[in-house]
Amino acid sequence: TGRLMGVRADITPQVARIDAHLLAANAVNRLCYAGSVLHTQSDGFHRSREPIQVGAELYGEAGAEADLEILTLMLQGLDACGVKTLQLDIGHVGVYRALAQEAHLSGTVEHQLFGALQAKDSSAVTVLTAGLPVALRDAFAALPQLYGDRSVLAEARARLPQLAAIAAALDTLEVLDHDLVGVEAAYDLAELRGYGYHSGVVFAAYTGGRSHAIAQGGRYDEVGRVFGRARPATGFSLDLRELVIASSDKQ
């Protein structure tokens, strides 16, 4: 018919619009949702291009306690659905962002370095940072190695520059580590999933030897800017179909 049709790839923008225009201006708002979304390509083999996205989001609270609340809610939800054994990966995009700003990287180099870090390609990281001061070269080179248990957080403080943004990011991760009891967590400071979207903590839960996350989320404080309110925001989402499969595998 030649008429335009809009489809959604993510429900979060709709939730951000509700927070911006329909709810109390300065309140802490807790919202949840469920609905179908449409992706151009599936996220993996045998995965649907039309996930049933379920999630929860918290607006108006910038502290680590809000990240902890959302992360705990995600874990409790998975546990209630019978997914008991999890590997939790946690990162913070603020670490890389602080280093990139300190190094005054061009957009092209920052994009290339982002790809190298995502691939854990240490050789490419070395080449791309060759012209930087030694302290920054060493810091970028350290990021792919800063992966593991809570000892990574202390190691990061020793190996990375003493920048306020990095210290704040590590403080947040330490709060999460202190209060996440009985969870197998790995910290990955080169985890930059959603780098252009997320603004702080990022996390993903894996189970059953699957290569893709069963649930994921993080902080995205700028998500409401397009609606006139860039409020603190954090949340998680999962694909209900994938959750049903994972829950069935545990039976």
Image (spheres, grey):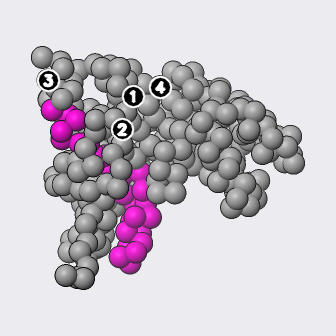
- Find out whether the residues at labels 2 and 4 contact each other: C-beta distance under 8 Å: no
Of 164 and 82, which appears nearest the observer? 82
Q: CA distance from mark 2 to mark 3?
A: 19 Å
Q: Nearer the viewer, mark 1 or mark 4?
A: 1
Q: Which residues are magenta?
A: 219-244
Measuring from the top left, give residue 178's x and y in whole percent: 42, 28
Q: Earlier in the sequence, mark 3 or mark 1?
A: 1
- The type of residue carrying mark 2 is Gly
- The type of residue carrying mark 4 is Ala
- Find out whether the residues at labels 3 and 4 contact each other: C-beta distance under 8 Å: no
- The type of residue carrying mark 1 is Ser
Q: Residue at x 38, y 78 (%)?
A: 228
- Judged left or right of residue 81, residue 85 is right
Q: Nearer the viewer, mark 2 or mark 3?
A: 2
Magenta residue check for 96: no
- From where the camera sits, is residue 207 visible? yes
Q: CA distance from mark 2 to mark 4?
A: 23 Å
Measuring from the top left, give residue 11's x and y in whole percent: 26, 59
Q: Earlier in the sequence, mark 2 or mark 4?
A: 2
- Find out whether the residues at labels 1 and 2 contact each other: C-beta distance under 8 Å: yes
Q: CA distance from mark 1 to mark 4?
A: 15 Å
Q: Relative to 64, does residue 27 appear above or below in the rendering?
A: below
Residue picked out by circle 2: 44
